[in-house]
Image: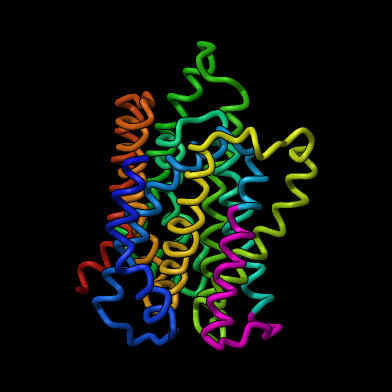
Amino acid sequence: MKLAIVIAIYYRHIAVSIINCTMSSATKHASPLWVIIAFAIVYVVWGSTYFFIQMAINGFPPFLMGAVRFIIAGSIMLSICALKGDKLWIQKDVGVAAYSGCLMLVVSMGIVIWAERTLPSAMVAIVIAISPLWFVILDKPNWKTNFTTRSTIWGLIIGFAGVLLLFGEAIAASLEGDFSNEQLISLVLLIFGPAAWAWGGLYAKRRPGTGPARVTTAWQMMAAGIAYVPVSAIHNEFAGFNPATVPAHAWLAIAYLIVFGSIIAFTAYVWLLSVRPATQVSTHAYVNPVIAVVLGVFIGNEVISWLKILGLAVILLSVLLINYRQYAKK
């Protein structure tokens, strides 16, 4: 947990500012400094969450962990919004937040949580790096621009080549008995999980709330937390669960996920979607898997083959090509 403490100290002095100042307006004329800070949080903190999710589910049933994480985080955020005097119940805004939140935090994040039961956190992060590809594919209003740009088309082709590279190794390992059917299913789900995240993010971006972005974030997390409860019940996770038996490291991990992964980083992400292009915001996929691989290998003692590292490099190259047009304009 030393790493968590270091990250906590680094971000503590900007956390209050992010909630009180940066998230107070959904204006598109955002301060460049706040944009940089928000990107830094999303890049680094979210990269670490893969490691802490795996640590948390070593003590919590997976979907129950999701319910606890997002209900607590959502409750804290709603309390902050109430103290700020925000209008919490605007039916249309709550509906949009609930729908997008369930797509992003229940469908997509639920797949990540489920997959990390059997797959190394670093490998999960590598596969999730394809998220920007789904943003391009699902961003229908920009198809005319995206699919007439050579760099974007090549980025998509190379990105899926990287996915095939990862699948090729997994299938070969499965035939040799080193990769179970459950792991293979988890890998397939991880390919399509980011599609739900991209759809939810784009849906929220096109239907901005009438209030501060922090209200949208709060309802997204609360809706997701509530949705996890029946999912957890269906998987019979409540039976025999005793909080007293949960090890200390799992409690610390879920505390980190609530405060940094959900309240701070997810709030920064939602705000960035309101002030920056979705494809640009999705570039957190450059850094997140690298942070996750470093933590998984050097802290979690996970074994990642050179072929997986090559697959990650290919996928990140595809993300670079997809965003090349924006970079060239700059």
Vertical comparison of 291 with 30: above or below: above
Residue 197 seen in the figure: yes
Q: Quadrant of residue 19?
A: bottom left
Q: Position of residue 73 (x, y in %)?
A: 56, 62
Q: Position of residue 275 (x, y in %)?
A: 39, 79
Q: Which residue is at a point 30% across and 37% down the rendered structure image?
A: 294
Q: Which residue is at a point 34% across and 61% down the rendered structure image?
A: 41
Query: Looking at the image, which is closer to me, 46 or 143?
Result: 46
Q: How many marks?
A: 0
Q: Which residue is at a point 67% across and 86% down the rendered structure image?
A: 90
Q: Magenta stretch containing residue 72, yes or no?
A: yes
Q: Position of residue 296 (x, y in %)?
A: 37, 34
* Left or right side of 56 for 229: right
Q: Position of residue 155 (x, y in %)?
A: 34, 52
**Residue that lies at the very extreme toward the top in this rendered image:** 176
**Residue that lies at the very extreme toward the front in this rendered image:** 244
Vertical comparison of 70 with 93: above or below: above
Residue 154 seen in the figure: no
* Left or right side of 172 for 99: right
* Left or right side of 85 for 286: left
